[in-house]
Image (cartoon, grey):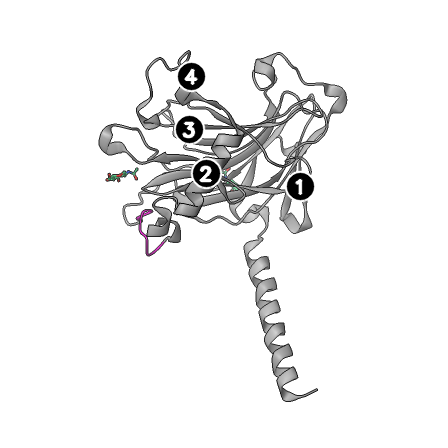
Amino acid sequence: MSFSDNFFLSFFAVVLLRGVVNCIAKDIAFDVNYNVTWGNDHVLLFNQGRQVQLSMDVQSGAGIGSKLSYGSGFFHMRIKLPNKNSAGVVTAFYLTSNSQNHDELDFEFLGNKEGKPITLQTNVFVNGQGNREQRFLMWFDPTADFHSYKILWNQYQVVFYVDNIPIRVLKNKTNIGVSYPTQAMNIEASLWNGESWATDGGRTKIDWTNAPFVAQFQGFNVDACPLQPQISNNNINCYSPSDYWWNQRKFWKLDHHQQKLYEQARAKYMNYDYCTDRSTHPLLPPECL
Ligand SMILES: *[C@@H]1O[C@H](CO)[C@@H](O)[C@H](O)[C@H]1NC(C)=O
Ligand SMILES: *[C@@H]1O[C@H](CO)[C@@H](O)[C@H](O)[C@H]1NC(C)=O
């Protein structure tokens, strides 16, 4: 083997090793940042805690939540949904301030009968006010594989992503009276009984002969600005672009390419939008302008 071959090989070995190390460093165990919040006996950890399974049967569902709350971030979870007949079963990944007039940013997958599409419902609460549902069909089978679901939250915008496609944007337009999340939020995920509302408006109930329903979660590293609840955080600026990369200029708005993906995804896959629902919102909500 010549010097150049050797050089080439060791170069590749280093690159490869770096990749592996990065991957391991990023793919950290569940219990570093998260706790089980309910349904302890319906939670299983696999692969040294890098994968978590929540299950639901007639006794209970289950939930997990971050130990800390956060003031900004680019949040993510990889999720594989319950397969087969999951009507009435809701799989959720969301941020919530858990406060009285709470802020909340939601992904909720509304299970369905086998062969019928699963709907992804997104919602936004600010100061305790929700009723801002937008619903989408997925362009893939979310029960077949893991996909990434992400929420960007900085001072300029909140963006919901499915894999790398932005599907929903809430811009900070507080200057024209649009409410925008400000409260520190926890990251939560859960599997729960939503049969009273989730599928066909609550008409299709859970078929318990298919239980337990099982959802898988991965991706427990957290890219976010931590705020300890109950401790004053006057010295932490969660909107600092130098301390936190998701506050940098390129995350202030969608770029041209993302904007195109966003418009396409909404045109093709959005099947409900509160902004155009005059039965629930007689006046156009200001954030919809
Ligand atoms: C999370 O779990 C740790 C250790 O199990 C516990 O000390 C802590 O109070 C829990 N935090 C929350 C927010 O439940
Ligand atoms: C929203 O934008 C305004 C500037 O228009 C800024 O002063 C404010 O801090 C932002 N709000 C949040 C919650 O980021």
Q: Which residue is mark 4?
A: 277
Cα separation, mark 1 vs mark 3, equals 26 Å
- Residue 53, given in percent of the width and then of the height, sits at 66, 38
Disc nearest the viewer among 1 and 4:
4
- Residue 265, given in percent of the width and then of the height, sits at 50, 35
Q: Which residue is mark 3?
A: 124
Is tag 3's residue or tag 4's residue first in the polypeptide sequence? Answer: 3
| Residue 60 occupies quadrant | top right
Question: Badge 2: few (under 14), some or many (20 or more) residues near its Cα, within 10 Å?
Answer: some
Cα separation, mark 3 vs mark 4, equals 16 Å
Q: Quadrant of the N terminus?
A: bottom right
Residues drawn in magenta: 237-243
Cα separation, mark 3 vs mark 2, equals 18 Å
Cα separation, mark 1 vs mark 2, equals 22 Å
Residue 62 lies in magenta, yes or no?
no
Question: Badge 1: few (under 14), some or many (20 or more) residues near its Cα, within 10 Å?
Answer: few
Q: Residue at x 41, y 20 (%)?
A: 276
* Left or right position of 277 against 174: right
The amino acid type found where label 2 is placed reads Tyr
Q: Which residue is mark 1?
A: 145
Is tag 4's residue or tag 2's residue first in the polypeptide sequence? Answer: 2
Q: Residue at x 35, y 33 (%)?
A: 181
Q: Quadrant of the C terminus?
A: top left
Vertical order, 184 against 114 (above or below): below
Vertical order, 245 against 94 (above or below): below
Q: Secondary structure at mark 2?
A: helix
